[in-house]
Amino acid sequence: MNRRKFFYLGSAGIAASVTSGYAADFSDLTPRVGLIGAGWYGKTDLMRLIEVAPVNVVGIADVDSKMAEGAAEIVGQRQASKKKPQTFKDYRKMLANEKFDIILVGTPDHWHALSMIDAVKAGADVFVQKPTGCDVVESQAMLAAARKYKKVVQVGTQRRSTPHLIEAKKNIVDAGLLGDVAHVEICCYYHMRKKMKPGDAVAAVPDHLDWDLWTGPAPMRSYNKIVHPKGWRSFMEYGNGIVGDMCVHMLDATRWMLGLGWPESVSSDGGILVDTESIANISDTQTATFDFGKLQVVWQHRSWGSAPDKEYPWSMIIYGTKGTLKADVHRYEFVPHRNGETIKKEALNESDRFPYDISDPDVGTNIGPAIRGHMKDFLARIQDRGKPIADIEQGHISSASCILANQAMDLDRTLHWDIAAGKVKNDDEANALLTRPYREGYLHPDPKTV
């Protein structure tokens, strides 16, 4: 009996793990897991997987040896076997060294596509963080690879697995309490864009970091004090700004709530309007409109000033003819327009069963249940070989739509998407931007040849 058959024999193993917080040691019979990218969210995802399933984490890859070793120490303490996984600087060596059943990808965005594609080629099912790519063709190639190699790929848009949002979808949206919906506002007003003048950011590369490998396919630029870890989100070379980081979550949640596919067109305005002296090059102010025909979803972010609603600074507001639904990672609130009472629900708190929701840095009691739910859905789909709740195709649609928003802002025009052709209609300049140049030594993935 192979590892997967043993592990997924019914749901008893997962249920027992969830109840106890940890599972028994099944040695070589448990699924072999590897982590690519051992930073903030890579570790967060991996720890939640360990909490819900009897897995055997045997490999961790990160270009920062200090980060890889730290993650390996934590895994050695928390997984049932108490075995410390082997660490690697280059994930490609890890994939060549072991046979993995599951790979988690928690790298910076510019490495998502290559590592996810290599993982499915190596025979693993993959949990990859959002967004699915830094450019649209990367994202298309990830979808093509998942389908070609017949692998389950779950994207880390875990709002679809957030307990109180699942309830809001069922009891408010699907129950028809909103009435007809023709407008949605999504937003983020967190001050998450790093502020530092270029001269103040000068720094030497730490001895424990391979900067050349960290940079990978992205353009080579000098290391600075804020780029690693986490601060890379402030640079367009490695991601897609606040739209690619935060809008993708709320746009995806809106699409899931309302059953939306691709937007017909995307427009956007904004730029660096306030903090013009920082080394950061992502927009500090931006509005984007995702037009679905009879419904428009409008995004806005500002990394300065205050939020118009301090209780919902990163949220979605769905306007219906019968009522309005506000929702975020902490709660939801439905307000009927006329008769009826306001319905409120706070995020599920499982810290009594999973104390690490409180003690782990950057997790929080609202995050743990959502990731655990996302992992359990991923594991169930590995068992039945179905599509997970945040299947790579859904992640691709939400991610590519956000990438198009940035392109629309840069080009200063509305982009009309051709779903069948997978490109912008009648716009050669926009289509040329769907594939960004890769640094010498790296080959951009092609959906036709993955």
Image (cartoon, grey):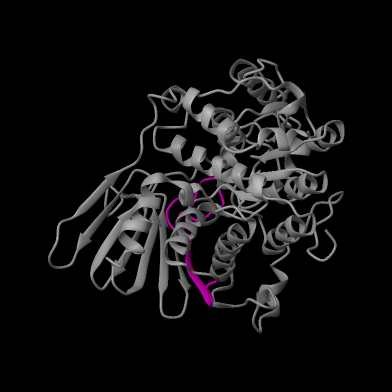
Residues 95 and 2: in front is 2
Rendered residue at 79%/59% (across/down)? 148
Judge whether residue 40 can be spotted in this image: no
User: Left or right: 3 with respect to 79?
Assistant: right
Judge whether residue 4 can be spotted in this image: yes
User: Where does the image place residue 80, in percent across and percent down from the top left?
Assistant: 62, 19
Residues 133 and 229: in front is 133
> Is 116 above or below relative to 136?
above
> Is 95 above or below relative to 220?
above
Rendered residue at 44%/37% (across/down)? 369
User: Left or right: 260 with respect to 45?
Assistant: left
Rendered residue at 46%/50% (across/down)? 159
Residues 280 and 386: in front is 386
> Is 367 above or below relative to 72?
below
User: Where does the image place residue 193, in percent across and percent down from the top left?
Assistant: 48, 45
Question: Residue 96, located in which quarter of the rendered image?
Answer: top right
User: Where does the image place residue 323, in percent across and percent down from the top left?
Assistant: 23, 66
> Is 107 above or below relative to 436?
above
User: Where does the image place residue 199, in percent across and percent down from the top left?
Assistant: 58, 38
277 part of magenta stretch: yes
Tell me how many marks there are. Answer: 0
Q: Which residues are magenta?
A: 262-284
Q: Residue furthest bottom?
A: 426
Rendered residue at 67%/78% (across/down)? 420
Residues 290 and 176: in front is 176
139 part of magenta stretch: no
The dominant secondary structure in magenta is: loop
The quadrant of the rendering that contains the N terminus is: top right
The quadrant of the rendering that contains the C terminus is: bottom right
